[in-house]
Amino acid sequence: MIEFGTGGWRAVIGDEFTRANIQRVATAVARRMKREGVDQEGFCIGYDRRFLSRESAIWFSQAMAGAGIKMYFVNLAAPTPQIMFTVKNMNLPYGAAVTASHNPAIYNGIKLFTRGGRDATEDVTNDVGREANALSQEDIHLVSFESALRDGLVTFIDPRDQYLDSIMEKIDMEAIRARRPRVVLDPMYGVSLTGLMTILFTARCDVDVINDRHDAFFGGHLPAPNPDTLRDLQSSVADHHADIGIATDGDADRLGIIDETGRYVSANNVLVLLYYYLLKYKGWKGAAVRNTATTHMLDRVAKAFGETCYEVPVGFKHISSAMEAHDALIGGESSGGLTVRGHISGKDGLYAASLLVEMVSVTRKPLSALLKEVSDTFGSLYMAEYDWALTHESRESIHEAVMVRRQLPDFGVPVLKTSYLDGCKVWFDEGFIITRFSGTEPRVRIFAEMPTREQARELVRRMAQFLQLPFEN
């Protein structure tokens, strides 16, 4: 079955991620475009450096061309935000990136975008998924890639310059040139290197790079920038006496940060830092948007500046929609994705990284000092994050207990309220805990935020024990 989650359709290569299923998705998209009367406007597709990504983009294009859809094919592995930018810049009704983002190397997938370069909403992806699953092989009409190129149904494009220029126009490049920070980049064997190096070299930064070769197995690690995968970057920042270490996930829409002391800066803190910087140092105005599993420190910062922080379900499409509805300044999530008003509607690791380098340069303060400035002003909150792989049976058992019977353990602190909007979220006087199933992998995740690490971990321990999940503190 083809099933779209919060980050598009992702599946194990050779299991459900197959040429036949890819072409079913393409045919379903083509049929939707025809029903909407936009089939003559064209479609942009790009791909990352995963195994079979380019081939999958070709297979997708064969089915789209077979349905008479003009394809704009980004002919080099590219960041997902670059494809989103291109859909917006070319005013196309739809586009897609072949990527499984931060999933393990055995996965691949397709992220679908709609006009304006937005993540497709659930009604779009659910409709595409239903139609794709109902198609037979006889419903799919193919044109060879070579024929499609020859006949103009497929055109190679290279929108990289326009995309990078759009970022550099929004960044204070002169401030960075004056400060000339030293940066260590870790593209995690993904697609961000050329773009980030172009931006940073143009700003006259000193740049060192690790993990830059093409490796479809991502060096044996998850291409997800987190404390477990960024130890090489931490060491490299210390070795080079760098001002900042920047890592991006496999398709470069999310990032991870190491400060000048070699300490990992959580995605929650990165989001808070940037919001604080934009409000205080740049004097911008606007609300913040976060998903239900992201730090409530954003709420404190927003309130202090007379702004509002809006909460939405997990899935960046919800953040994008809320940002548009409220003309919000920044939106982000605890997994490392964020965007800022005036750029694309989706998350962009390259733009976020560039803005962080600008922040260090404009303030002339190291990241550790800026983090202390925030905590001195707004206090401290600590997030404990844990996840577990699930079998079908264990998933059903947890869903029955938490979402159907709505049973909860004794947390040891008074409960203020609960919500089942996206998983089960429980509020306390000083924090929260949320239990939800991943939208991209067969896993359950528990996040808790409290004033101390010990309090946050204790909440997770109690919930995990209640759900009979193994827990090591």
Image: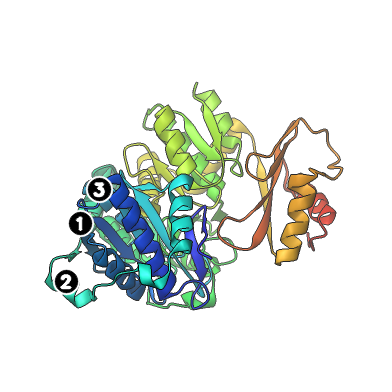
* In the image, residue 328 above or below residue 39: above
- Image quarter (top left, top right, bottom left or bottom right) of the C terminus: bottom right
Which of the marked residues, 1 or 2, is nearer the chain's N terminus? 2
Q: Which residue is mark 1?
A: 161
For badge 1, the amino acid type reads Asp
Q: CA distance from mark 1 to mark 2?
A: 23 Å
Q: Nearer the viewer, mark 3 or mark 1?
A: 3
Q: How far from the left and from the top, in percent, is residue 255?
A: 46, 56
* SS assignment at label 2: helix
Are dots 2 and 3 in contact, CB under 8 Å? no
Q: How far from the left and from the top, in percent, is residue 47?
A: 34, 66
Which of the marked residues, 2 or 3, is nearer the chain's N terminus? 3
Q: Which residue is mark 3?
A: 38
| Residue under the image location 65 percent in, 38 percent down | 380
As rendered, which of 32 and 423 lies closer to the eye? 32
Q: How far from the left and from the top, in percent, is residue 57?
A: 32, 69
The reply, left or right, for residue 433 in relation to residue 28 is right
Work out whether residue 262 can be spotted.
yes
* SS assignment at label 1: helix
* In the image, residue 236 above or below residue 80: below
Q: Residue furthest left?
A: 151
Q: Which residue is mark 2?
A: 149
The reply, left or right, for residue 165 in relation to residue 434 is left
Q: CA distance from mark 3 to mark 1?
A: 27 Å
| Residue under the image location 35 percent in, 62 percent down | 27
Are dots 1 and 2 in contact, CB under 8 Å? no
* In the image, residue 394 above or below residue 287: below
* SS assignment at label 3: loop
Q: Nearer the viewer, mark 1 or mark 2?
A: 2
Q: CA distance from mark 2 to mark 3?
A: 21 Å
